[in-house]
Image: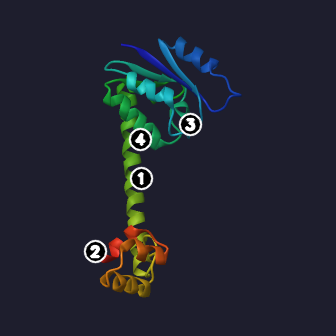
Amino acid sequence: MTVFGYARVSSDGQSLSLQDSQLRAAGAAKVFAEKISGAASERPQLARLLNQVEEGDVVLVTRLDRLARSTRDLLNALALIAKAGAAFRSLGDPWCDTTSAHGRLMLTVLGGLAEFERELIRSRTGEGRERARDRGVKFGRPRKLSQFQRKEALARLQNGEVHADVARTFGVSRSTISRLAVN
């Protein structure tokens, strides 16, 4: 069993030394540290840590906001840690400790709430889309060619003109004209 620490600060003006010393004092054998915004989707040191963690290991942070900026990010990271068979602890958030039954319960509740929230968002989005469709809102990209231009392009194709020449005339790609011929 190895205890891995993860430390992160957002800017060059901040220091990692306090987090590093707290993590080592709590038993971290190795600390992965980086100076990068928590909003950044690519955090190389976190990725290295998550790739290295194995069954029985523990991932340790000083505070949850060092690991994730949102509930969804946190749950995704915790899922990767759990998938590896490892546990997670936050020194500043004692309730977030998957090494204890209480901590696992709290994270299960948090995960359930996040899933419920996603379902509510999906439902509201679908209802909004349906109402917009009922009002006559057209979804997707606008057509490149008007109805008249489409008819003219099809007539030119039937007269034997090459797709590329017709496309050039209307200022569209050859594939746009090819799709007309298929539909």
Q: Is residue 21 above or below residue 163?
A: above
Q: Residue at x 43, y 22 (%)?
A: 59
The residue wearing badge 4 is 110
- How many residues crowd around disc 4 within 10 Å: few (fewer than 14), some, or many (20 or more)? some
Q: How is the image coloured?
A: rainbow
Q: CB atoms at circles 2 and 3 under 8 Å apart?
A: no
Quote the CA–CA distance across marks 2 and 3. Answer: 48 Å
The residue wearing badge 3 is 38
Q: Amino acid at mark 2?
A: Val
Callout 4 secondary element: helix
Quote the CA–CA distance across marks 3 and 4. Answer: 20 Å
Placement of the N terminus among the 4 image quadrants: top left
Toward the left, the furthest residue is: 182
Residue 97, located in which quarter of the rendered image? top left
In-front residue for pair 30/142: 142
Q: CB atoms at circles 1 and 2 under 8 Å apart?
A: no
Q: Amino acid at mark 4?
A: Leu
The residue wearing badge 2 is 182
- Disc on the earlier residue, 3 or 4: 3
Kindly report which numbered mark, 2 or 4, lies closer to the viewer in this rendering.
Answer: 2
Q: Is residue 59 above or below residue 107?
A: above
Residue 42: image x %, image y %?
50, 36
Callout 3 secondary element: loop
- How many residues crowd around disc 3 within 10 Å: few (fewer than 14), some, or many (20 or more)? some
Q: Is residue 83 left or right of residue 28?
A: left
Quote the CA–CA distance across marks 4 and 1. Answer: 11 Å
Quote the CA–CA distance across marks 1 and 3. Answer: 22 Å
The residue wearing badge 1 is 117
Q: Residue at x 44, y 25 (%)?
A: 48
Quote the CA–CA distance across marks 2 and 4. Answer: 50 Å
- How many residues crowd around disc 2 within 10 Å: few (fewer than 14), some, or many (20 or more)? few
Callout 2 secondary element: helix
